[in-house]
Image: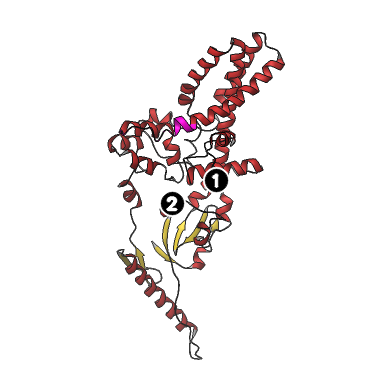
Amino acid sequence: MKVYTQQEVAKHTKADDCWLIHNNKVYNVSDFVADHPGGEEFILDHAGKDVTALMKDELEHLHSDGAYEMLDELLIGALFSSSTTTTTTTTTTTTTSATTTAIDRQQHEAEMHRRLGANVTDTKNSETGEQEYYLNDTDLVADKKNRFLDLNKPLFHQLWHANFSKSFYLEQVHIPRHVAGGSARLFSSDFLEIFTRTPWYIVPILWLPIIAFNVNRGLQQGLTTENTSGLFVAGMFVWTLAEYMIHRFLFHLDDLMPESNYSNIGHFLLHGIHHYLPMDRLRLVMPPVLAITLAIPINYLMHTFMPLAQGYVMMAGLLFGYVLYDMTHYYLHHAKVFKIHFKEMKTYHLAHHYKNFEGGYGITSKIWDRVFGTTLEL
């Protein structure tokens, strides 16, 4: 990793070429700009600048431990800062000043290498003839995999053979990670891998025809348009409760998990991977296999406790609520939100990921968080 001046860092201010300074270290965050949880504008507003104070400002933009761990993966160098004393002399020439600055910089780099306790590689630049100093790269992937998972290898296989304790697994899976330019692989098998990656548009493509079918069946059974509309809206409201219950009591069944590697794997496949990689665009909306698995018993209960026609329409409303939920969920993670409600819900939901996962279970609204006392204080 090279040592850079503040002037060099200040040149990198575009979305596809964005550098930041934090604690006298230089980071290339270009691959993370589009996936920044707060929106890319928050990074671009400070591109090429020092964000040390900003990142720990509780009123402005407090960051979690997970955010700093993700930042470490983007480290490219250290910041050069001169501490030389300026003296006035009429005999100092421009050449002498430049030479002194170069010497000061090399001495500063060597001292920084010594303080960091890293091996130093020095080499002579073939074009300029100047001696250049580099820190030997730290294998961050190897460092991380010793503690949890290597994102360059299929995750399921690692979990299967890891035998992590429950406490260690839950601690690690709730520290967000980021994979630049794509998704981490879950399975070695290409066939199985297909079922774990779901583009957002699959949700409306799959469920809207089913919703239309259910509404039509209800009308064919003799329901009036007014009754159909009322039942449809009621089904959407029921979904808001189902959304909360599924998220809190199924996806976050952390305390009731047994001390078992199998339970760790089940948790990871069900929802843990979303907390581990919250900005993974292909593992955000619910995979069709999981969604259908959850929908079948709900549909059975709906038809068990309601007449046939009403059950069809209520289920249609519930499924439509689900579609809106998954689209909202994707929107909050990856879109530049505009409406006041969505801005508030984006902040609220990302706090669930990056600050406190034991609260804030509502995605589309806070209604049931308020009812059950799990509202996050931002």
Report the residue marked by disc 2: 65
Magenta run includes residue 33: no
Q: Is residue 322 left or right of residue 293?
A: right
Local SS, label 1:
loop
Q: Main structural element of the magenta stretch: helix, strand or loop?
A: loop
**Residue 76, how many percent across, how many down?**
42, 58
Is residue 202 visible in the rendered image? The answer is no
Number of other residues with Cα within 10 Å of mark 2, as a class: few under 14, some 14 to 19, many 20 or more: few
Amino acid under disc 1: Glu
> Looking at numbered disc 2 in the image, what kind of residue is underneath it?
Asp
Q: Which mark is residue 377?
A: 1
| Range of magenta residues | 247-260
Q: Dots 1 and 2: beta carbons under 8 Å?
A: no
Q: Position of residue 291 (x, y in %)?
A: 49, 25
Mark 1 or mark 2, earlier in chain: 2
The quadrant in which the N terminus is found is: bottom left
Q: Is residue 258 magenta?
A: yes
Whether residue 175 is situated above or below residue 55 in the rendered picture: above
Q: Alpha-carbon neighbours of circle 1 within 10 Å: few (<14), some, or many (≥20)?
A: few
How far apart, in angstroms, are the residues tagged by discs 1 and 2? 18 Å
**In the depicted view, which residue is nearer to us: 23 or 231?**
231
